Amino acid sequence: MQTTSRTSRKYLATPIFGVLMGVVYLVALSVAGSPVYGVLAFGVMVAFSAALLLARRRSETVRGLLDHRDERISAIDLRATAITALAMIAVVLVAFVVQIARWAERLAVQHARLRRRRGYVAAVIYLRIRG
């Protein structure tokens, strides 16, 4: 009897987490001033969680991904997670380089403005002394 209860909890862990993340999105977007987007994000997460629950009844793959009892599907899940991690690392590195480039561009613009100000101040001083 307890095995069925534990199995049931394993199946429900991912959908429950999805609904909780929907609540987090709802609160975060509402605090940010976009409650409509918060409700939409919550709805998407609830719909996705419900789709998982429905799909587990018909799909061996979804069922295996939710309970991790099938070694073959767990191995596929592990490889997919590794690929996703590599993609995320690449995205973070590219975003970091883009931010550095933007920062360098802003720094160059501010440096050019500062040079113009120095030139202006030097011209004012020169013209004042001269005449």
Image (cartoon, rainbow, N blue to C red):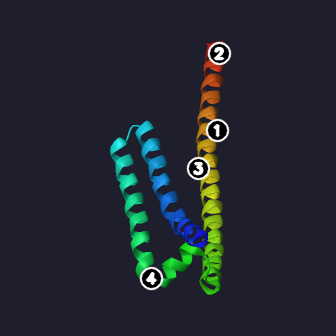
* Amino acid beneath label 1: His
* Amino acid beneath label 4: Ser
- Say which of 76 and 123 sits in front: 76
Q: Distance between the residues labelled 3 and 1?
A: 14 Å
Q: Tell me the number on the disc at residue 59.
A: 4
Q: Distance between the residues labelled 2 and 1?
A: 28 Å
Q: In this view, does 34 lie to the left or right of 68?
A: left
Q: Distance between the residues labelled 4 and 1?
A: 60 Å
- Residue 29: image location, x then y, percent: 43, 43
Query: Is residue 32 shown above or below 123?
Result: below
What secondary structure is found at the residue carrying circle 3? helix
Residue shown at the point (59%, 35%) measured from the top left: 113
Q: Earlier in the sequence, mark 4 or mark 1?
A: 4
Residue shown at the point (51%, 78%) measured from the top left: 63
Query: Number of numbered discs present?
Result: 4
- Residue 101: image location, x then y, percent: 62, 53
Specify the farthest residue to the bottom: 72
Query: Is residue 105 shown above or below 76?
Result: above
* Amino acid beneath label 2: Arg
Q: Disc 2 or disc 3, which is closer to the eye?
A: 3
Q: Crowding at label 3, few (<14), some or many (≥20) Cα neighbours within 10 Å?
A: few
* Amino acid beneath label 3: Arg
Q: Earlier in the sequence, mark 2 or mark 3?
A: 3
Q: Which of marks 3 and 4 is nearer the N terminus?
A: 4
- Residue 49: image location, x then y, percent: 43, 64
Q: Name the residue under label 1.
A: 111
